[in-house]
Image (spheres, grey):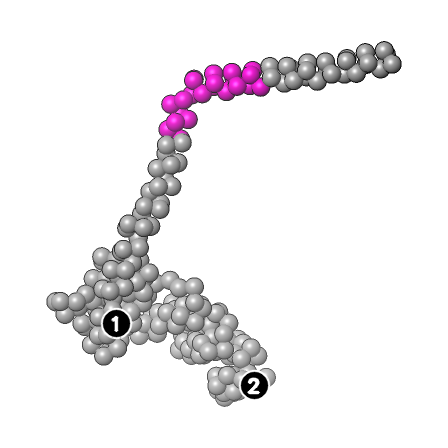
């Protein structure tokens, strides 16, 4: 019994020593951390403050700058869209003196979603007015995650290049439009690519495109007519 009590007594002392050692290690670590902070506090404080300012600036920008700008841009583009719908293309582009046109929306709110959309509208207006290079420049500034909208924009760039007798660039953008891989626009723009290749005197490349339409989109209007185009080039498969 005495041995057991002695052992228990010894055992109760051991954790106390471990706790003291642990306290010493923690204190030593704290001392080292304090010493490190003392030597580097200017840098540390600058980093922390900089991070805090960055976070605050992001949310502040989003709340007080980005969102209000987006709302103002949506209001600004509204009348320009009405002009566009009424085929008043010059007013849609340049405004009427009281309301913004798409070009003013781009200039003032170019970084907003409405500003991005204004590039598309402005591009369409320029192309329809016969200002093909201006249309190309505006459409190239437009971006969309919607594959159909993106393909239409690329296809319109291809149309503008064809009007400028630049078949090579037209083919490139028609193929981009056709690469969206949807039944609505892909066969249409691939057909235009094939026709542009024929105009550029590249019948073999045109055949390849026509075969692609025939195989991938056989139920489309273009797909059902591919034998006619291939026969014209002396190849029906």
Residue 118 lies within the magenta run: no
Tag 1 residue: 81
**Occupied quadrant, residue 113:** bottom left
Picture residue at 76% right of the left edge, 16% below the top: 11
Picture residue at 37% right of the left edge, 34% below the top: 50
Q: Nearer the viewer, residue 236 or 175?
A: 175
Residue 198, given in percent of the width and then of the height, sits at 43, 78
In this rendering, would 191 be left or right of 156?
A: right
Query: Is residue 226 visible in this depiction of the protein?
Result: no
* Mark 2 residue element: loop
Q: CA distance from mark 1 to mark 2?
A: 46 Å
Residue 143, given in percent of the width and then of the height, sits at 37, 62
Residue 102, given in percent of the width and then of the height, sits at 23, 66
Residue 220, given in percent of the width and then of the height, sits at 50, 83
In this rendering, would 101 be left or right of 157?
A: left
Q: Residues within 10 Å of mark 1 (few under 14, many from 20)?
A: many
- Number of numbered markers: 2
Q: Nearer the viewer, residue 149 or 81?
A: 81
Picture residue at 68% right of the left edge, 15% below the top: 16
Residue 31 lies within the magenta run: yes
Identify the disc placed on residue 236.
2
Q: Which residues, given as a range, are shown in magenta?
A: 26-47
């Amino acid at each position: 019994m005495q041995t057991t009590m002695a052992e228990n007594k010894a055992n109760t002392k051991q954790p106390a020593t471990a706790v003291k050692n642990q306290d010493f290690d923690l204190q030593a670590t704290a001392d080292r951390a304090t010493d490190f902070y003392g030597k580097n506090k200017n840098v540390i404080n600058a980093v922390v403050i900089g991070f805090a300012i960055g976070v605050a600036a992001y949310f502040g920008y989003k709340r007080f700058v980005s969102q209000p700008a987006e709302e103002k841009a949506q209001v600004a583009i509204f009348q320009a869209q009405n002009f566009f719908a009424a085929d008043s293309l010059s007013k849609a582009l340049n405004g009427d003196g009281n309301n913004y046109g798409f070009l003013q929306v781009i200039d003032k709110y170019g970084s907003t979603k409405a500003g991005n959309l204004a590039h598309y509208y402005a591009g369409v207006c320029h192309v329809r007015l016969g200002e093909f290079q201006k249309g190309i420049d505006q459409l190239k500034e437009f971006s969309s995650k919607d594959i159909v909208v993106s393909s239409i924009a690329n296809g319109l760039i291809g149309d503008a290049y064809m009007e400028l007798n630049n078949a090579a660039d037209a083919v490139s953008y028609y193929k981009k439009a056709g690469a969206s891989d949807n039944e609505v626009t892909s066969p249409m723009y691939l057909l235009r690519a094939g026709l542009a290749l024929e105009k550029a005197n590249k019948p073999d490349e045109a055949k390849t495109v026509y075969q692609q339409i025939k195989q991938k989109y056989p139920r489309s209007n273009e797909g059902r007519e591919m034998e006619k185009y291939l026969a014209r080039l002396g190849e029906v498969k």
